[in-house]
Image (cartoon, helix red, strand yellow):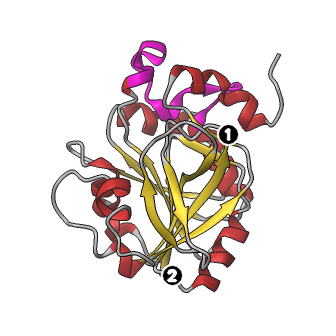
Amino acid sequence: MSDIDVVVLAGGLGTRIRGILGDTPKVLAPIAGRAFLGHLLDQLSASGAQRVVLCLGHLADQVTTWLEREESHDDLDLICRTEAQPLGTGGALRHARDELRSDTVLVMNGDTFTDADLHAFVQAHRRSEAEASILCVEVPDASRFGRVEIGPDGRIRRFVEKASGSGTINAGMYLLSTTFLDRIPVTGAISLERDVLEVAPSGTLNAHVIQARFIDIGTPESLAAAASVIIGHSIT
């Protein structure tokens, strides 16, 4: 991981949980006594990552203040890129492109957590020789997320609309080659998921499927459950 730059997409509005967080940005949601972003940085630090680019937007000043006052990851080189206007996840990534130096970049959503083995993810991506890999997890209820349909060769065939029941979903973590990054449109607000990944030619994307703890803190219910998922046991 030391030779792979990391991008954390942390500029979301957090509309569905604003009633709980108020004017606190989603990435700073308090989870088990620590800001959610802190848990993500803990994971990256433990995995040996060194350069992390934070793509900020909504309430960015609170995040930078938190980094200055409360964050203590001396082993991480943290770079902030703040968008002047909402660019979407794809646009934010493209906006930060000139900060990225490695041939492969790890991109992670700032509102999801999974206790994935990042080394295994990198190794699987390199073996696949794909331009991009998506970390996928199996969940008992895929209705919020939609499913990923994977072929026998491990490549993603298509993204399926949301439906109830168990399934394999996109866990919000990606390994992207610079070739893939450079095809993201330069202008406009775009979604990395809908406007880039879901329209990629069939066979372009590799799926790395794991069984792991996973949480997306985007709803009041999942925000309430986040502590037990991140810590790995029930919080009483």
**Image position, residue 151 (x, y; %):** 56, 72
Q: Which mark is residue 182?
A: none
Looking at the image, which is closer to me, 112 or 11?
112
Amino acid of disc 1 = Pro
| Type of the residue with mark 2 | Ala
Mark 1 nearby-residue class (10 Å; few <14, some 14–19, many ≥20):
few
Q: Earlier in the sequence, mark 1 or mark 2?
A: 2
Q: Residue furthest left?
A: 187
Q: Which mark is residue 130?
A: 2
Q: CA distance from mark 1 to mark 2?
A: 28 Å
Instruction: Check whether the beta carbons of the residues at disc 1 and disc 2 lie within 8 A of each other.
Output: no
Q: Is residue 235 above or below residue 43?
A: above
**Observer-nearest residue: 165 or 14?**
165
Residue 17: in magenta span:
yes
Residue that appears at 54% across and 27% down: 29
- The quadrant of the rendering that contains the N terminus is bottom right
Task: Specify the segment rendered in magenta.
Answer: 16-36
For this rendering, which residue is in front, 220 or 104?
A: 220
